[in-house]
Image: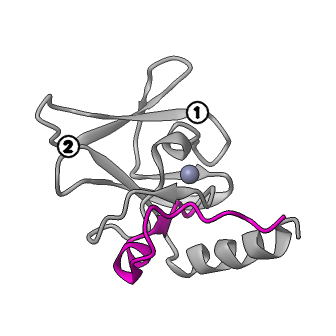
């Protein structure tokens, strides 16, 4: 069975606007400003260097600033980087409010995409 296409249309423009999460490779909403942001599911997997789960929250309700906290005990996590599935990422305040997490190395995305293609069952 050939894989069915998941695109709604065959417009090239729509295809261009597809982007993948750099950590799990699933399709995520296209964002021109953040072409390599980590999807919301992977954000939940963020840990520190030692593998302790970290949650990043906005400091204000309007979505300004951010603060990392250890999920286990709520202690503050100082730093703006984290690890998701072994990918070192940095945390940033998103332009549109909220928090955006992106991998340090942009090339990593390409590597992961290539690996995923290789591992796909034929
Ligand atoms: Zn993901």
107 above or below 79?
below
For disc 2, the marked residue is 65
- Image coords of residue 31 (percent x, y): 31, 65
Q: Is residue 56 magenta?
A: no
| Dot 1 alpha-carbon crowd within 10 angstroms: few under 14, some 14 to 19, many 20 or more | some
Please give the residue where the numbered disc 1 appears in the rendered image. 53
Q: Helix, strand, or loop for circle 2?
A: loop
4 horizontally vs 81: left or right: right
Place of residue 110 in the rendered image (x, y in percent of width and height, measured from the top left) = 60, 80
As displayed, is residue 101 above or below residue 62? below
Give residue 6's quadrant in the image.
bottom right
Q: Is 77 left or right of 20, judged from the image as shown? A: left
Work out which residue is located at the far right of the displayed protein and give it: 122
In terms of secondary structure, what is the magenta stretch mainly?
Answer: loop
Q: Residue at x 58, y 57 (%)?
A: 26
Q: Residue furthest left?
A: 62
Residue drawn at (58%, 33%) of the image: 53
Mark 2 CB lies closer than 8 A to ligand 1: no
């Amino acid at each position: 069975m050939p894989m069915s296409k998941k695109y709604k249309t065959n417009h090239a423009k729509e295809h261009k606007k597809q982007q993948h999460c750099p950590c799990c490779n699933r399709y995520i909403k296209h964002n021109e400003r953040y072409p390599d942001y980590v999807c919301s599911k992977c954000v939940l997997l963020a840990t520190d260097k030692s593998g302790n789960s970290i949650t990043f929250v906005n400091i204000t309700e309007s979505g300004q600033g951010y603060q990392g906290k250890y999920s286990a005990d709520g202690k503050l996590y100082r730093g703006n980087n984290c690890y998701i599935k072994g990918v070192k990422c940095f945390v940033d305040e998103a332009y549109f409010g909220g928090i955006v997490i992106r991998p340090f190395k942009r090339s990593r995305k390409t590597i992961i995409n290539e690996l995923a293609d290789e591992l796909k069952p034929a």
